[in-house]
Image (cartoon, coloured by chain):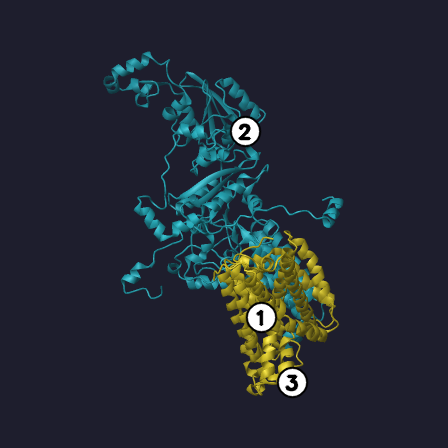
Chain colours: A cyan, B yellow
Amino acid sequence: MDIKKLLKSLVTYTEPKPYHQFELLEDEECEKKNDPTTKKEAEAQGASPDNPEPKKPLSFEEWNRKRQPGSKQSSADAEPASDSGPSDNNDSGSDKSGSSQDSRQKHPISRDLRENLATIRRELNSPTNQDVIIREFKVMQKRDAFLVLIDGMADNETINNFILRQLMANWQFGQCGNAAGVKKRDESESGQDGQEKGGAQTGQNKTDTSSVDCSVDFIAANLLSANQIKKVDDIDSAIKQVLNGLTAIFVDGDNACIIVETRGYESRSVSTPMTENVVKGPQEAFVENLRTNLTLIRKIIKSKDLITEIIPIGKIDQINCAIVYMKEIVNPKVVEEVKRRLNNLDIDVAIGDGVIDQLIEDHPFSIFPQIISTERPDRTASFLMDGKVALISDGSPFASVVPVTFFEMFHTSEDSTIRWQYGTFLRYVRIIASFFAVFLPGLYIALTLYHKEMIPNELMVSLHKARENVPFPTIVEVLLMEISFEIIREAGIRVPGVVGQTLGIIGAIVLGQAAVSAGLVSPVLIIIVAITGLGSFAIPDFSFAFALRILRFVFIFLGAMAGFYGISAGLFVFGGIACSMKSFGVPYLSPIAPKTKSNPNVINKAPVWMQKERPDYLNTRNRRRGGNPVRQWAEEAGGEKSQ
Amino acid sequence: MTEGKFGTQEAVWLTVCTIVAKVFFTSPSLVTSILGTSGWYMTLISAAVAAGGFWLTVKLLNRFPNMSLSEVYMRSLGRVAGFAFSLILGIYLLFVASLNIGEFQEVLRVYVFPNTPNGVIILIFAGSVLLMSLLGLESIARISKIIAFFTVAGFLAVLILSVENYEVSNLFPILGYGLDKTIINGVLRCSVYGDVIILAIFAKSLQGIQYVKRAGFIALLLSALLIFLCLLAFALCFPYYVSKEITSAMYEIATIIDYGRFVQRIEPVFLFIWVTTSMLASTTLFYSFVRLYCDAFRIYDWKPIAVAGSVILFALSLMHRDISEIAFAGVQLTRMIGIIPMFIMPVIALFIAVIRKKGGNEVA
């Protein structure tokens, strides 16, 4: 910033701009849905409370017409699109109508194939760009056509066997556009029986092939044997799809093209989680392929209410970002807010979920993460069933979940798969580990500098003996070791494979031992740093662990500056900051501050059958997770005492 | 000036922490020097009087539903008198906040940082108060709930661990310097619980007057219980002639805890709850001042006022010669005159509202 402007801003007053912060307040709709009386009334009137009015599905043509830029209902009617491939980008295109990203004029497809070919070549920089494949051919050996794809992104086998072979074959028809009468000439001529049965018909076909309908509608209905196809009428949409690995087929005389799902690029196969390992529980992790990731979730939640909407992010490189939620559980306002934020991003490129997370989070300057990033499909599914929204970006093996709370940073998927006593124990271990990770070095400094009276005499003597050869003040000693540890840690991650792990272990041992032998640090400090490091590794969430690692240095300085007083002041301020935060409208320290109803699953974890309700702070459409009692067999057997 | 919303629990703990923070400082020894050995139950009389005063304040709020105290003053007393009442209460709260900080700084100097300059201690404190104030009422209310867990746990831990030092004979003579003195001081010192008025100042942030009423009475009950237990433990631990000389009652009680080689001298641990509770109390009072000031002058943007106010707070906190001046000239004075802005002014407003037939929508 210009220094003049900075100085001016310090001495001049400007009215604060009204800032609207999204808040997830009690919602009448959700309240009504959870109200048993309202439910009964609605049911009595013959309507299902969960599905108030069944929506009539739109026909193919109607749908396309509604999505024209002039249509008022374009985004409203773009009902949560299924995750069917070819429709992805166009759905979002309609969502984005009016946004700055899609303000460019659309190029309609011409009826003149040559003109379309020239436009495609110009837009895709062909033949300079040699990844672009344009294949010209004749449909049914009659009508000129071409298809366009990106080499490597599309699956060659699908294109050769199920598109080109189908389109280039010499078909004969009973009636134009009548699929029932379509037969391949060779087949019809090869079988005697066939000739006998349909002799008259075949004869008729042979005489009239010039009037064959080769429109894209006919091709889509009769010739292409691909499972996902879509008709689009503008070049820009077609190019977007092609860049995603789909194939566009243009036919002469038609002002639309067919987009066929042919994605077939190389991707990593599903493997075990790298950062969220568990002993008990599923061992699958997300990969870089969006389709695969969505399938992994669907494999767990086999429900019709699992909705996937896809929004492309970025002006130049449009990364597909899937919004996944449970329609009958999630609060619709959260979904709307997520879509609003994603649709209002004006950025060239947002590679990966990490960048998108940073673009949509509520408090970008806060040190605490407000979005949970997980690589586990089972954990994502669990969040979805709680009423949260997951964002999965193409090319990223992580799902970002919103809204989240502070206490969920200590949870892992293993907490649910093991018995509640063990889960609770593990959470306490993690909380203690987090405490050590943040406060231990600061407390050590505060104790040795300001509060010596607290240290028992014997311990004090041994501490002093250990430190007598160390020439540095305690703060320098601690910083030296902490920074060395962070360097070893970073180096260990960057160095590949086994060498990295070895470097970490050997580095820590050798460095620590050498530092003690050289009299640079005291042995006690090695123990402090080791426990701190171990503590930071025990924090399940990677971003949260980062936040605590940085906070550790703040508390080291505060402890050195003012002992326990400084640390208390830091706690007060950072606690206040955490209290002031919201994650997509949900207070960060819910359900403790503010107090809201929740399952006994915040720090202590109660048995699964006691967790009957979804968290109140999410204000979900369907609060109940299970019946009352959940374990009905126990009641049948004489009453469930524990409930 | 827009405010956030908070629930009854947050309101209760915010008030409890603000009231209870006083026992960390010189107040218990002041009470002992004035009343001898009867100080521990004198606080119950103060709490009862404060409850009466708060009941009248709620009556006033009932006449003007959905209004904060400053708005009620404006409606009840008129623009000029309402402005004066709001400003007097605001300045009083700012003064109390600065006294809290001054007391805190002096006590900290006595026990922990004898060589640290006053300015440094106060700067850290005032800085934290400002940062927290800038985060807004919702955040203050929410953190109060978290701090309250640790404060109550710390209180109870200190009281339980010091059981071995309790000496029942220290309570005698049970009437102290005389029952009359105990009752009079109990009534006058009701301003100890006067901080409950913050609920009236932030009445609009709660869901309704009935919640203000409920939160206020629960807070008074809990505060009275905690202060009573603290004063009782203090009286049990030290003979009254020693108690008079002690700067910080709770800190001293924590100091004498001794359960072997490792569970001893745990007062620095106690420092955490002491610091955070004191900061919370000062933040609440300071934020109340900012709120009243902005309401009085009809200022929408409160953040610049908070920044400027924090400079005044810092300066006021530095303006004392020593701990005696703070304790006898400052704290004792505010305890005696505090009843006026905390309880008498709302009663006057209620009286005038009745005479002028202002308001009158009985809700609760």
Q: How many numbered dots are placed on residues in this image?
A: 3
Q: Sequence order check: which comes first, mark 3 or mark 1?
A: 1
Looking at the rendered structure, whether the residues under marks 3 and 2 are on a common chain is answered as: no
Name the foreground residue: A261 vs A83.
Answer: A83
Instruction: For residue B199, say whether it is visible.
Output: no
User: Where, quadrant-wise, is the C terminus of chain A in this rendering?
Assistant: bottom left
Residue contact at pointers 1 and 2, CB within 8 angstroms: no
- Label disc, if present, on residue A131 of the rendered structure: 2
Helix, strand or loop at label 1? It is: helix
Q: CA distance from mark 1 to mark 2?
A: 78 Å
Q: Give the x, y percent position of residue A28.
A: 43, 49
Looking at the rendered structure, whether the residues under marks 3 and 1 are on a common chain is answered as: yes
Q: Quadrant of residue A472?
A: bottom right
At 27% from the left and 61% from the top, the residue drawn is A636
Instruction: Please indicate whether residue A57 sits to the left or right of residue A14 in the image.
Output: left
- Label disc, if present, on residue A74 of the rendered structure: none
Question: Comparing marks 1 and 2, which lies closer to the viewer?
Answer: 1
Mark 2 — on which chain does it sit? A
At 48% from the left and 56% from the top, the residue drawn is A412
Q: Is residue B6 above or below residue B38?
A: above
Q: Which residue is label 1 attached to?
A: B193
Q: Give the x, y percent position of residue A367.
A: 60, 53
Q: Which residue is label 3 attached to?
A: B241
Q: CA distance from mark 3 to mark 2?
A: 93 Å
Instruction: For residue A342, say whether it is visible.
Output: yes
Looking at the rendered structure, whether the residues under marks 1 and 2 are on a common chain is answered as: no
Question: Comparing marks 3 and 2, which lies closer to the viewer?
Answer: 3
What's under tag 1, amino acid-wise? Tyr
What's under tag 3, amino acid-wise? Tyr
